[in-house]
Every structure is written in structure tokens, then in C-alpha cells.
Amino acid sequence: MAQPQPVSSDIAPDLAPDIYERILAVAAIILLLLVMTALVRGIDHWRSMEPLIWGHLATVMIPLAITPVQLLRRRGDRAHRILGWIWSVSLFITAVASFGIRDINEGQLSFIHLFSVVTIVSVPLLVLAARHHQIARHRGTVRGLITGALLTAGYFTLIPNRMLGGWLWS
Ligand code: HEM
């Protein structure tokens, strides 16, 4: 009798980090270093920075620092799950709270809030995929979110007309 075919997303793929995930890990480390450099260079402006932006930086630095760890170390164990929850919750909070920051477009939402929408939709999906052991789907959503939101939104903050970019390149 024919055996039922497994759903592709249920097949456990090779769990080791591939070349793309190694590149993402390095990109996250470089971004973390650049943001920290910008913050140090902007130390004279810290007192005038809005509390919401301090909060945004605090919540986003958590997933940014965890990203290379999750991408490079062993997957699926207890530490991966704990760090994964911290990563997901802090990134989700970052995205929700970012709707309170409206500096770029004269008090209105800007195109950067699209990253927030993508994040708010994607984080629950990647958590659900993990809980249902849909490894390929979980991995794909995490990779997409790191590429398309965390790193893109992060590197965008380093262009000279943004706050961090202004401090970094001054
Ligand atoms: C390393 C990653 C990130 C850093 C360092 C960062 C930093 C900042 C800073 C300093 C601001 C306010 C100053 C400015 O706009 O120049 C800002 C604004 C903002 N960020 Fe981030 N961010 C990061 C990632 C993200 C992510 C992942 C999201 C969405 C999920 C996001 C969404 C926003 C939004 C919507 C704004 C407001 C833009 C506006 O004023 O219209 N950021 N970010």
C-alpha cells in the first residue's frame, strides 16, 4: 500500500547554517558595530533624543545581538527556543512601538512603517511554524524577516540624513 507523502514543510532539512545564514550573521554583527559606533559618536546629542527612540533602540538591539547567535549555533535545543522567544517578542515590540515614531514624514507614517507591518505579520507566523514543527517554513520566514526587515531597516538608519547616519558620518 502507498505510504502517505510527507508535506514538504514537515521534512526536517539539514539544520546546520548554510552560506546565506552565515552572510546574514556577519551582516548583523557589522550593523551592530556600526550602530554602536554611531551612538558613541553622537554622545553629545543623547539628552535631546526622544524617549520613544531610546526605547526603539533598546528593543531592537536585543534581536540584532541575538541574530548571529541563533544563526550560527545549534538549532532546536532549549537555548535556541529561549533565545528565539526573546528575539521574537523584542522584535514584535519594536515594530508595534515604531508606530509612535513619525519623524521622517512630518508627523505622518512613512515607508519605513512597512517594515513594521511586515514584522507584525511575520513574527507570529514564524513562532507558529516552529510550534508546529514546520521547520522549512520557520526557517524561511526567519531568513526573510532578518533580510527584509531587521537588516534593511537597520542599514537604512545609517544613511546620512537619518539620526544615526548623521552621527556616524559626521
Ligand atoms: C538595527 C536595527 C534598527 C535600528 C538601529 C533602528 C534605529 C532607528 C532610529 C534611531 C530611528 C529614529 C531616528 C530616525 O528615523 O532616523 C528609527 C525609526 C524608525 N524605525 Fe528603526 N531601527 C532599526 C530597526 C527597525 C525595524 C526592524 C523596524 C520595523 C520592524 C523599524 C521601524 C522604524 C520606524 C517605523 C521608524 C520611524 C520612521 C519615521 O520617522 O517615519 N526599525 N529607527
Image (tube, grey):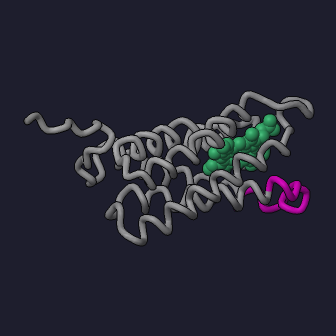
Q: Where's residue 146, x and y in %?
A: 51, 44
The secondary structure that dominates the magenta segment is helix
- Give the quarter of the image for residue 54: bottom right
Residue at the image position 14 percent from the left and 38 percent from the top: 3
| The furthest residue to the left | 1
Percent position (x, y) of residue 26? 42, 51
Can residue 43 be found in the magenta stretch?
A: yes
Nearer to us in this view, 7 or 154: 7
**77 shown above or below 94:** below
Residue furthest out toward the bottom:
78
Q: Which residues are magenta?
A: 40-53
Q: Position of residue 158 (x, y in %)?
A: 65, 42
Left or right: residue 76 versus residue 34 is left
Q: Is residue 147 magenta?
A: no
Q: In the image, residue 159 lies at what x, y percent? A: 67, 36
Residue at 45 percent across and 65 percent down: it is: 81
Say whether residue 90 is visible: yes
Picture quarter with ligand 1: top right
Q: Is residue 76 above or below residue 31?
A: below
Q: How many marks?
A: 0
Q: Which one is nearer the viewer's eye here, 90 or 102?
A: 90
